[in-house]
Amino acid sequence: NGGLDSLERQKIQSYLAFKYGMTLNQGTSGYSYIASDGSSIWLNAGDGYHVAVFGIGRDDNSGLNQKQATPYNYASYPIAVSLGTSFGTLNQDNTNVFTNDMSFLAFSTNVASPNQRYDGGQVTFLSSGTQVRQNQVWKIQKSSQFATQNVTFNFGPASVGLENRYVILSTSATFSSISSYHLIGSNGLVTISSADLAHGSFMTLAADAVGP
């Protein structure tokens, strides 16, 4: 009948934060999210990527079965992710199934004052034209139990005047080289294999540069 110890509290807070896309207070030393068995859902690595934490995952022991998610402050960070090739109206409407227990796919950014401007510099991944990327970057964390499954993102409608938009992925936070790129549909949706969403890699949006 004693109170919860610090590890038990961390597990409960992690479950609630991950389920609802809320970022826990990181304090001065960081506060990672852990699963019911104590393994990592999302790790604060001390690299600044601890803003707008959200993601999808399955933890049978805790009852977590989060198949689609957005950051709690979606208005500032307009990104959503879903297991499979589409979104359900609600999480329980998503009929896709995680292959394995303890599957987690988490995202976080280092941008506390977000904007959707494409002012992060030029990137090279197409053989023609010029592309520029957003300054806002997302870091990906993925558990080893996460099988190769489709994952769909919704980035919302493009701003007026933007040409093609892409999700670009890189092992570098500066996108000095591009691991893969994926064209975003006119509806803001793009489906990517989780195999392309490597643990520790980085993700941002790019668009075709429009001349004056």
Image (cartoon, helix red, strand yellow):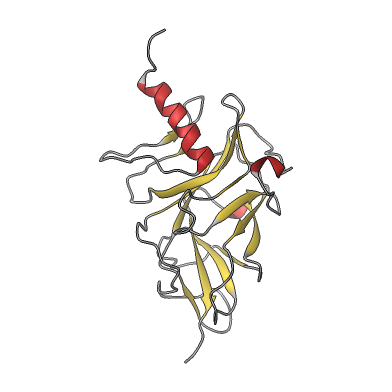
Left or right of residue 185, residue 172 in this image: left
Identify whether 138 is placed above or below 158: above
Determine whether, in the image, residue 71 is placed left or right of residue 94.
left
In the rendered image, which quarter contains the N terminus? top left
Residue 147 in the image, given as x and y percentages of width and height:
65, 42
Residue 58 position within the rendered picture, expressed as x and y whole percent measured from the top left: 60, 35
Residue 40 in sight in this render = no
Above or below, comparing residue 97 to residue 6 in the picture? below
Q: Residue at x 43, y 72 (%)?
A: 117
Q: Quadrant of residue 65?
A: top right
Along the line of sight, the residue nearer the viewer: 117 or 147? 117
Residue 68 shows in the view: yes
* Image coords of residue 183 (percent x, y): 63, 69
Residue sticking out furthest to the left: 28
Q: Position of residue 168 (x, y in %)?
A: 54, 65
Residue sticking out furthest to the right? 95
| Residue ID at (40%, 25%) | 9
